[in-house]
Amino acid sequence: MRRLLLACRLALPLLVVLSPPVLADPSSNVRIAVLDIERVRLNAAAVREIRSKLGTYLDVYRADTQKEEQEIRTAQDELAGKRAVLSPDAYAGERKKLEDRLAEAQGRVQRRRQALERVNVEAMEQVKQSLEAIVTEIAGERQLTLIIRKDQAVFATPAIEITDEVLKRLDQRLPSVQISDPGG
């Protein structure tokens, strides 16, 4: 098995070097461009603002959650100290209240997480729609017939990359995105 894998590793580069190149029909009018969609998602002003705003909500939620967790731990410690003093029924009742409070807190955390995700999806949909419109415009202006993602290309010359132009237009057209309050 190892020999087979070694043979394949050695033969593959030779096949690539020795095989004739696949050329497009010179009479065709195929015009190709490459777009680094990940770079757009990381560097677009609107996306950075979305991350910043959601990060602010997340920080507030995290602080609230940590405060509530500490309060619940303190209540658990107090209840443990009262165990010898309370009757079994009273202790069970207090423990049930604490468990209900914990379940409520966990539910709130889950609802907040879902709300943040919903708001993120809504905001990113605005970016996606603008991005699609810009890419369509550029394709029309440059008479492009195919735009591929950079992460799907094995090789592309910088001359056919449209990422900088897409980013520039996206930042001009959509410098910020209004996000709704996730609540919580």
Image (spheres, rainbow, N blue to C red):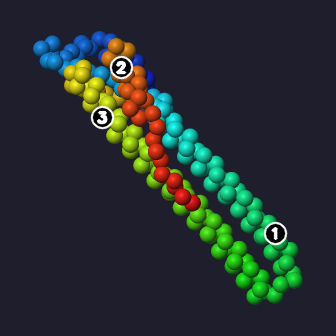
Residue type of the residue flagged with mark 2: Glu
What element does badge 1 sit on?
A: helix
Instruction: Give the labeled residue for mark 3.
Output: 133
What element does badge 2 sit on?
A: loop
Q: Residue visible at 40% across and 18% down?
A: 10
Q: Which quadrant is the C terminus positioned in?
A: bottom right
Circle 3 packing at 10 Å, graded few (<14), some (14-19), many (20+), is: few
Circle 2 packing at 10 Å, graded few (<14), some (14-19), many (20+), is: some
Question: Which mark is nearer the camera, 3 or 1?
Answer: 3
Circle 1 packing at 10 Å, graded few (<14), some (14-19), many (20+), is: few
Question: Which mark is nearer the camera, 3 or 2?
Answer: 3
The answer to which quarter of the image holds residue 129 is top left
Give how far apart the Cα atoms at labels 3 and 1 are.
58 Å
Residue 117, position as x, y percentages in the image: 49, 52
Q: Classify 98 as above or below 65.
A: below
Instruction: Give the labeled residue for mark 2.
Output: 161
Q: Classify 60 as above or below 11.
A: below
What element does badge 3 sit on?
A: helix
Q: Residue visible at 30% across and 22% down?
A: 33
Give how far apart the Cα atoms at labels 3 and 2 are.
17 Å
Residue type of the residue flagged with mark 3: Ala
Instruction: Give the labeled residue for mark 1.
Output: 77
Which numbered tag is attached to residue 175?
none
**N-terminal of the two: label 3 or label 2?**
3
